[in-house]
Image: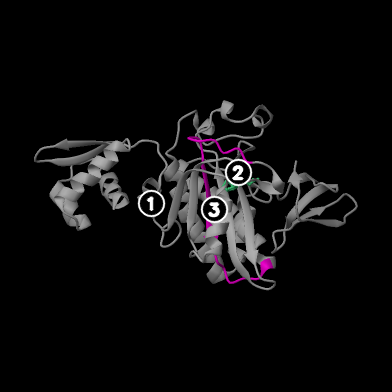
Amino acid sequence: MRDKLLQVLEDTADVYVSGQEISRLLGISRTAVWKHMEELRKAGYEIEAVPRKGYRLTHIPNLISADEIKSRLHTKTFGQKLVYKEEVTSTQEEAHKLAGKNEPEGTVVAADKQLQGRGRLDRPWVSASGTGLWFSIILRPDIRPQNAPQLTLLAAVAVTEGIANASGLQPRIKWPNDILLNEKKTAGILTEMQSDPDRVQAVIIGIGLNINHDKDHFPPELQSKATSLALENNGTAFHRADITASVLRSLEYWYGTYLTGGFGAVRRRWEELADTIGNHVRAVSRFKTVEGYAEGITDDGVLLIKQKDGTIEKIYSADID
Ligand code: BTN
């Protein structure tokens, strides 16, 4: 109910809305409206109350909470079931547990802080409190395990567009799924799977959004490679729930497009948003370094690099310079 009340207050932020109108809209008593208002105030919202005029929301704290995100969601299922925790080991772990308990598609686990955030290639993911938003979503597509990497590219498209829609910034994608602003990483995506030999049970997509970090929030070795939306916006912070809700909306859109129309549209959009394709690149993996012209990606999300001698090398996993 608190998320619905917030939605009413945010939708009418320019005008006063009476307690009677709120109680009619939400189908609850005026006493219940008053109690929920008090809870919101305790959580840091400033709500003006003027006799015979009503209530007006004057300040939204830059909190992240289930209510904050849910009141901004324009989705059918994604994030409608949302578990929010102030601190977790990793939202991936939590989401894996929930997926194993048959929680439905679209369930999200979000956190303000992760103690052991995980990145690709077993790297740690810096996830301090009050800066970004760390979340994992459970998907249950009826696809073969070998097609799951398509969802990683889908998530990259969705995160890029979700950030752009909510912030006006224009991120680009670096293969396979780094989201960059000014050539520095502002978001990362980790896709993991629970699967039978020929059928996917669940795909857990973990998304880390660097939103309001200062430079000092990143360890020295990352400062030249990592950035945040605020840093690329002249230091002006964003509401973390706005960005998160926008990413979830865009994820739901692209997932729906994928399920009904296949990978083609996702792939075309990925290629438009990706800086890697059409450039000379160096793919560095644990086993080898491949250098050449990035021709494109396959339907499995594999990167194709044309080397000097004309041979095409398939890159499954690497860092791109
Ligand atoms: C990358 O290396 O680029 C992927 C980073 C993914 C980080 C996110 S934050 C939410 C989720 N929980 C984790 O432990 N990792 C992912």
Instruction: Let me know if residue 243 is in the magenta part.
Output: no
Q: Mark 1 points at which residue?
A: 70
Q: What element carries label 1?
A: helix
3 vs 2, front mark = 3
Instruction: Give how far across and how far down residue 286 sits, in percent.
Output: 82, 46
Which coloring applies here?
one colour
Query: Does the residue at mark 1 contact the one at mark 2 (Cβ under 8 Å)?
Result: no
Vertical order, 137 against 261 (above or below):
above
- Indicate which disc residue 183 carries: none
Q: From the Cβ of disc 2, is ligand 1 less than 8 Å away?
A: yes
Q: Quick check: 43 left or right of 166?
A: left
Q: Which amino acid does label 1 sit on?
A: Lys
Q: What residue type is labelled 3?
A: Glu
Q: Distance between the residues labelled 1 and 2?
A: 23 Å
Whichever of labels 3 and 2 marks the residue nearer the N terminus, that label is 3
Stretch in magenta: 125-145
Whichever of labels 1 and 2 marks the residue nearer the N terminus, that label is 1
- Indicate which disc residue 94 carries: 3
Q: Residue at x 38, y 51 (%)?
A: 70
Whichever of labels 3 and 1 marks the residue nearer the N terminus, that label is 1
Q: Which residue is drawn at 55% across and 39% down?
A: 210
Q: What residue type is labelled 2?
A: Gly
Neighbor class of circle 1 (other Cα within 10 Å; few <14, some 14-19, many 20+) is: many
Q: Which residue lies furthest to the bottom in this view?
A: 198
Q: Name the residue under label 2.
A: 117
The prevailing secondary structure element of the residues shown in magenta is loop
Residue 264, picture quadrant: bottom right
Neighbor class of circle 2 (other Cα within 10 Å; few <14, some 14-19, many 20+) is: many
Instruction: Give how far across and how far down residue 147 sits, in percent.
Output: 66, 66
Q: Which residue is drawn at 63% across and 64% down?
A: 194
1 vs 2, front mark = 2
Q: How far apart are marks 3 and 2 (CA)?
A: 12 Å
